[in-house]
Image: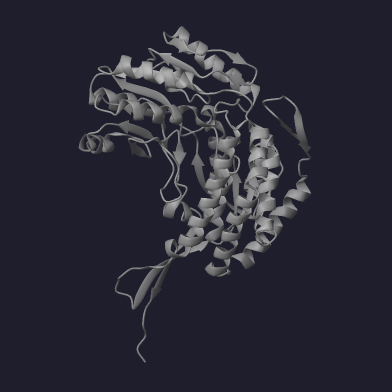
Amino acid sequence: MLTSINPYTGEKIAEYKELSKSKIKKKLKSADKTFSEWRMSKFSRRRELLFNLAEVLRKNKTKYAEMITAEMGKPITQSKAEIEKCAWLCEYYAEEAENLLSKKVIETDAHKSYVTYEPIGVVLAVMPWNYPFWQAFRFAAPAMMAGNVGVLKHASNVQGCAELIEEAFLEAKFPKGCFQNLCISSKKVERVIRSKYVKAVTLTGSGPAGSSVASIAGQEIKKSVLELGGSNALVVFEDADLDETVQTCVQARFQNTGQSCIAGKRLLIHESIYDEFVEKFLMEVRELKSGDPMDEETFIGVLAREDLAEDLEKQMNKSVKKGAKIILGGNRDQTYFEPTILIDVKKKTPAFKEETFGPLMAITPFKTDVEAIDLVNASDYGLGVSVFTKDLDRAEAMIPHFDDGAVFINELVKSDPRLPFGGTKDSGYGRELSEDGIKEFVNRKTVYFKKIDG
């Protein structure tokens, strides 16, 4: 049984019975059968259904958001925003998919030659709990508009969300078998990847989970895409707009109670504005309201599980032993972790070199552009970096020096359906969203015509 527990109240929400081996096979076989028909469907049909899905999401926004908040503790206003973003994603791919996947004509010595982009089959998505709807839709919308079908192995603690997502696809009139939830534990993922019906896998999660999934997929010679988290840096130069930058950095670190792969976890501040910026940052963080995630006024909720809060506490304590100083917060009560700020954080400090998944900010000063670049790249992760400066030429000159998959100037790193999303190094490989994302799970088919006279 998989159990869903409200991390704020500690109460059990529901239990979900794991699928048996035979039921898993039945679902995968159903997906494969549906694919044989879905792959030949017209873009106009797929477009209609994806627009339907956006309507379903908005119609049921409150119900879906309340399930997100109940299962993983996200403040309710942020849960509602997550559902709205999923609807936007569906509309984007409904409008753009046909154009993004149109054949590419290439001039050769052939009578004509071109490349087509065709679906590959059943794609398994292994998804995390921190954005339970967005992560699933970020995979499903482009994959299914490309003509693939999807099966979802969601995190065990958000099975209520997983069931609602499957119901949403059915309510939108997608063919049965086009998108299915697999209620299984992590132990059964390997069996699913190795199934003859599954052609590819995408995972968002931890490094060890990604390594395991990629290894199994590699043995089976199946495509994989990995998004494995990050330790994004926020680089604040001396000419930045301090008040606006402070606001952005607070959002970057503390939205979703800090439980985001693209959160700005390392705040690097030029020494000439260090004291002033830290004081302004402290003032803003002190104003964040903690409380019941169901309260519309709450900005800081709880962490999704108590073991996650314990892990963050250990990282904080080890960082303090390494010389970091707590200037705000530092207390934990079960799943609640106070918004916490550490200063004097050095490269070898856990809060600097590891991913901290919760409301903890590590602050480090720097003197020069070269030092700033070195600090950004000192992480094993490479998902994204934010640079704050009024000198856009200066910022643009630095971009090639960063290892990350994304660089945002005067803005927090965020996912946008129109832009490719993904990282380097321990943040994984492959891309989601935009044209790059929809082409991850397609067969790029080369077509060559030789004309025969007569």
Q: Is residue 107 above or below residue 71?
A: below
Please state if 233 lies on the left or on the right of 78 as rendered.
left
Q: Quadrant of the C terminus?
A: bottom left
Q: Residue at x 70, y 37 (%)?
A: 185
Residue 295 position in % (x across, y down): 62, 30
Residue 390 position in % (x across, y down): 24, 33
Q: Quadrant of the N terminus?
A: top right
Q: Residue at x 37, y 79 (%)?
A: 450
All told, the count of numbered labels is: 0
Q: Is residue 325 above or below residue 352?
A: above
Q: Is residue 449 above or below residue 342?
A: below
Q: Residue at x 69, y 57 (%)?
A: 170
Please state if 178 lies on the left or on the right of 434 as rendered.
right
- Asked if residue 120 can be seen in this view, the reply is no
Please state if 433 lies on the left or on the right of 107 as rendered.
right
- Asked if residue 432 can be seen in this view, the reply is yes
Residue farthest to the bottom, as pictured: 454
